Amino acid sequence: MALKIRLSRGGAKKKPFYRIVVAEATSPRDGKFVEKIGSYNPMVDHDNKERLVIDAERVKYWISKGAKPTLRVSKLISKDGLVDKPIINEQPKKSAPGKKRLEREAEEAKTETTTEEAKTEAPAVEEAKTEASTEEAKTEAPAEEAKTEAPAVEEAKTEAPAEEEKKS
């Protein structure tokens, strides 16, 4: 008989409340259990005492009898020092990038470093070009705006009398 220390869900829809129970590994999540040893309420603030209530003596007893805590429970009770903190990888091995993607990223990094080196070699020439182009853009912009505004005003004047004639 393999025992697990795990969470058993209770509470209403979208308002979970968990009991920390010792149960057989084959029994359903919310089914039959051997003993209730605590509770966990994720809806309460992190610093509240009622968030995690656990009987430390009973946890030690069941671990000595061979009960293994699940990953989530071991993470919760490791704060009290009852078990070692589990090692949780941030990125699973299955979702790690493949060989081709790693090669492509390495090539892109090389090209970026070469372009950055080229930029540092001739910054004065590029700065002069950008300053000249921005000055030209500033002088051309007002003229273009005037050209675009004038036809729009003339079209509005010609459309207004045509609408009045249709009404008559």
Image (cartoon, rainbow, N blue to C red):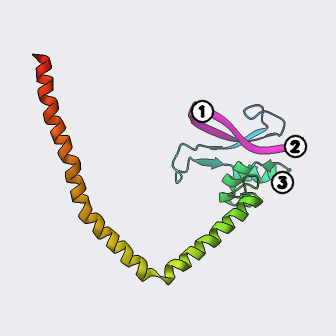
Identified by mark 2, the residue type is: Ala
One can see residue 100 in this view: yes
**Residue sitting nearer the eye, 51 or 131:** 131
Q: CA distance from mark 1 to mark 2?
A: 27 Å
Instruction: Answer whether labels 3 and 1 touch (C-beta < 8 Å).
Output: no
Identified by mark 1, the residue type is: Gly
Assign a secondary structure to mark 1: strand
> Which mark is on residue 33?
none
Q: Which residue is mark 2?
A: 2
Disc on the earlier residue, 1 or 2: 2
Residue 12 lies in the magenta stretch? yes
Disc on the earlier residue, 3 or 1: 1
Where does the N terminus fall, quadrant-wise? top right
Q: Residue 30 in the image: state x and y as whole percent.
A: 72, 32
Residue 112 lies in the magenta stretch? no
Residue 152 location, quadrant: top left
Where does the C terminus fall, quadrant-wise? top left
Over which residues does the magenta segment extend?
Answer: 1-19
Q: Which residue is mark 3?
A: 64
Q: Is residue 93 above or below residue 51?
A: below
Q: CA distance from mark 3 to mark 1?
A: 31 Å
Q: Within 10 angstroms of label 1, few (less than 14), some, or many (20 or more) residues?
A: few
Main SS of residues in magenta = strand
